[in-house]
Structure formats: C-alpha cells, structure tokens
Image (tube, grey):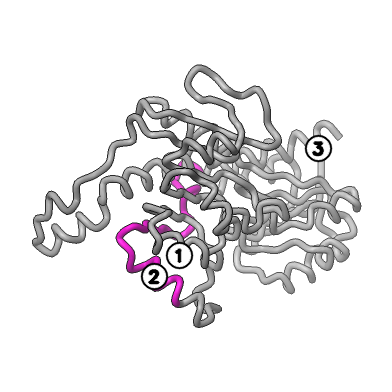
Amino acid sequence: MDKGKLIITDEMHPILVEKMTEYGFKCLVYPHATKEELTEMIEDASGIIINSRMVIDADVIDRAGKLSFIARGGSGKENIDEVYAKSKGIVCISSPEGNRDAVAEHVLGMLLGLFNKIPQASLEVRNKKWNREENRGIEIKGLTIGIVGYGNTGSTFAKLLTGFNANILAYDKYIETFGNGIVKETNMDNIFDQADILSLHLPLTKETAFLVDDAYINKFRKDIYLLNSSRGKIVKTADLVKNLESGKLKGVALDVLENEDFDTYNSEENEWFDFLSNSDKVLLTPHIAGWTMQSKRRIAEVVSSKIMEFYDNS
C-alpha cells in the first residue's frame, strides 16, 4: 500500500530507507537540505525524519498539508515545535532507545578518562614525558554518583556503573519507583548533600534550560565532578568556568556545549572556550556520545519500527 512521500533530511543508516520503502513509502533523501529547501518540498509529504541539524517550527509545519508524523533519529525533540505539531494532529517520534548504550558507554569512558588523566598522559608520553606521580588517578569505587534524569540514557549509565562498587543515586522528576538494590531512587536534596559526581541525562526544555548555573552548582555540599552528555544549554558556561576556577568543580567532562557553532562565538564565548580547552580539569568531545557504528543502525531500526507501529495502530 502506498504510504506517500517520506523526506529524510540527515545521514541515516541505509536500512532505514530499505525498511520504509518495503513498507510503502517513497523515500526522498536530502541529507544536506536547508530549512528553506525543506519548506519548499514538504507540502505533500506524509512524514519527515530529521536529526539534530534540522529545525521543524510552525512555519515548516504550516507548509505541510499532509504530514502525519515527524520522526527524530536519536533522543530529544527540542528542535521540533512539538506542541504546535500536536495541535495539527501530527505525531512526534524519537528514538532514544537506539543510542542509549552508546551514550552510556561514552559517559563512562569520559569519566574514566577524566579520573585517570588519560588524554594528557597519552599526550605527554607521545612527547617523551614519563610523568607517573603527576598523573596519579582516582578510583570510582566508594564514590557517590548522582544521576539526574533516569530515562533511557540515565538508566543505562546506571547499569554500567553497577560493577564499580560506587553509590548510585538517581533522581527524575517524572519517573518514580525505579530504584533497586543497587540504584537508590532519591531527591535532589540528597544528591546535593552526598554526590561526588553529577551526571546529567536530561532533555532540553524550558524547565531544564540553564538549570545548572552558579546557584545550582553551589548547592552541592562537596566539590564535585560534572558530566554532561545531554544538551549543552542545560549548563550555563559562564558559571561552569567560574566554578572550575574556584575549585567547586573539580573536573568536567562535556560532550556538548552551550554553543556548538564555533564560527558564531563572540569574544566572551571565545574566552570561556579558551579556558575550557586549556584546562587539564576538562575533557571535551564533539557531541558524539550517541554516535557509534552500532547506534547508527539501531536508531534507524527503532525509528522505522515506531513509524510502522504508528501506521499499523492508526
């Protein structure tokens, strides 16, 4: 049965087109399309699949007379005006199940890299510097890790931590009764009081935008380590730098930044980035936590199965 036109605006695993074509869609793949180009071609589309690059706002939605769904390859739907889409009867789909393992493993890798000074030690050895005492590490065992956000990635990260004999505290405003013998479900007051490490696993919403600012950081009784693999705009960079300078933040691992477009940086943003990039307390990666060879295929499989489920049940 002909399901109509499906526009795919980002690089996705080939299995997505294969599955969607078999299901009855005419797939049009435009991985480099601009928002303006998308607006011109979306009028008769039944669905659209995007990643983080494309923004689907009211202007785009208003041009889409036949759109049934908007699907996001990966987690988070902050680049979709979901409220407006729903008001038009358009279903919004995401696929965090596809890359939750990749994100969790990346965060664990960043934590181990930060604690054991692996990036700087590797660079020093390459430059024939054999500094052992200066690169003495820290063990996870016995520390308290606060996980804020216990959805797909937060819960998967907790599972990976279970073999390290750490104390795992988790808080999620919208999920309850998830605690078990290893992960303790708690509130933010206990995390502020007990955590040595804070790991963020939150969507970017009006509620979470710049949640982690100077006041938030200084609610922690201890000096802490911060891990952020969710969205850069959850953390206020100016306050991040301030608390790294003061020592309140003992170390930071960031896969995301408040502004990930270096070409648009102003002088203040350049100063913050220069500090972060030159600090041996900071580990940076370019928003790749969810990008593995396996997750690329898995995301495509999850997206396609959710689209087919939507059509089968409608």
Q: Secondary structure at mark 1?
A: helix
Q: Secondary structure at mark 2?
A: helix
Residue at 33 percent across and 68 percent down: it is 278
What's the amino acid at mark 3?
Answer: Tyr
Residue at 54 percent across and 46 percent down: it is 200
Residue 211: where, in percent of width, then height?
62, 54
Quarter of the C terminus within the rendering: top right
Query: Foreground residue, 193 or 304?
Result: 193
Mark nearer the N terminus (2 vs 3): 2
- Crowding near the residue tagged with mark 2, few <14, some 14–19, many ≥20 C-alpha atoms within 10 Å: some
Q: Quadrant of residue 91?
A: top right
Mark nearer the N terminus (2 vs 1): 1
State the count of labels. Answer: 3
Between tags 1 and 3, which lies in front?
A: 1
Disc 3 target residue: 311
Q: Is there CB contact under 8 Å for labels 2 and 1?
A: yes
Quarter of the N terminus within the rendering: top right
Q: Is residue 60 left or right of residue 268?
A: right
Residue 15: where, in percent of width, then height?
57, 44
> Which mark, by number, is residue 241?
1
Between tags 2 and 3, which lies in front?
A: 2
Residue 249: where, in percent of width, then height?
42, 54
Q: Is residue 300 left or right of residue 221?
A: right
Query: Foreground residue, 234 or 83?
Result: 234
Q: Which residues are magenta?
A: 271-295
